[in-house]
Image (tube, grey):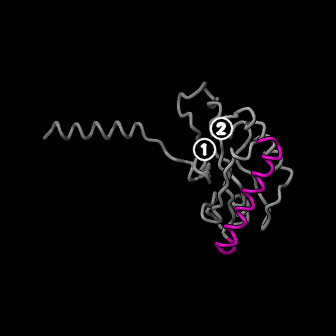
């Protein structure tokens, strides 16, 4: 009986050592917590400890995308149009995707808590589509980019302040 208990504990310890947190669902599109959900889609990346040289992300990983280009763009209230700052981030993402031709991404559109669920799902999809359209117009093959809307269901900041709402009006790009 004692050996069976020890074997179970050893197996549990091995499984725990091999497990990883799925930040995609936090960042929007899987991995997107993307730091997030899409993620997801997250800031922790795929390389993990020892995955690359100190301070450097594994090329083509979520962490590499975050470090090299950024994974989030932000929108004004009730808008899906891109501002200059968003276009700058998307320019860097397009360059990154061109350097990492084998990588596909999710783009998750998100909204703040105000408005109906239906309205926010539609607005989040328009935001994700704006992101994708810009990347495609800048040379990224459309089939490498999938979009999804989470509406108001995956806030980056759960607060109810103007600052929290501004953080939640975003599109998050996450490595698949």
Q: Does the magenta stretch include residue 174?
A: no
The image position of residue 27, as x and y in percent, is 61, 51
Q: How far apart are marks 1 and 2 (CA)?
A: 7 Å
Residue tagged by mark 2? 103
Q: Quadrant of the N terminus?
A: top left
Residue shown at 51%/47% (left/top)? Answer: 22
Task: Please rate how many residues cluster around mark 1, counting C-alpha atoms within 10 Å: few if below 14, some from 14 to 19, many from 20.
Answer: many
**Residue closest to the far bottom:** 116
Secondary structure found at label 2:
loop
Residue shown at 69%/37% (left/top)? Answer: 67
Residue tagged by mark 1? 176
Q: Is residue 134 left or right of residue 154?
A: right
**Residue closest to the far right:** 84
Along the viewing direction, whichever of 11 and 148 lies nearer the viewer: 148
The image position of residue 79, as x and y in percent, is 80, 64
Q: Over which residues does the magenta segment extend? A: 114-140
Name the N-terminal-most of marks 1 and 2: 2
Residue 159 picture quarter: bottom right
Along the viewing direction, whichever of 133 and 47 lies nearer the viewer: 133
Q: Please report contact status of discs 1 and 2: CB closer than 8 Å, yes or no.
A: yes
Mark sitting on residue 7: none
Above or below residue 18? Residue 171 is below
């Amino acid at each position: 009986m004692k050996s069976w208990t020890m074997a179970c504990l050893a197996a549990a310890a091995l499984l725990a050592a091999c497990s990883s947190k799925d930040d995609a669902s936090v960042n929007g599109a899987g991995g997107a917590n993307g730091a997030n959900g899409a993620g997801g889609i997250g800031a922790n990346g795929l390389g993990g400890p020892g995955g690359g040289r100190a301070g450097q992300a594994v090329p083509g990983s979520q962490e590499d995308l975050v470090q090299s280009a950024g994974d989030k763009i932000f929108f004004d209230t009730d808008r899906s149009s891109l501002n200059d700052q968003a276009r700058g981030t998307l320019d860097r993402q397009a360059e990154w995707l061109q350097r990492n031709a084998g990588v596909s991404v999710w783009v998750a559109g998100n909204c703040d808590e105000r408005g109906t669920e239906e309205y926010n799902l539609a607005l989040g999809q328009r935001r994700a589509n704006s992101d994708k359209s810009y990347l495609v117009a800048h040379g990224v093959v459309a089939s490498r980019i999938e979009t999804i809307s989470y509406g108001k269901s995956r806030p980056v900041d759960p607060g109810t302040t103007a600052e929290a709402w501004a953080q939640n009006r975003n599109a998050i790009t996450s490595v698949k």
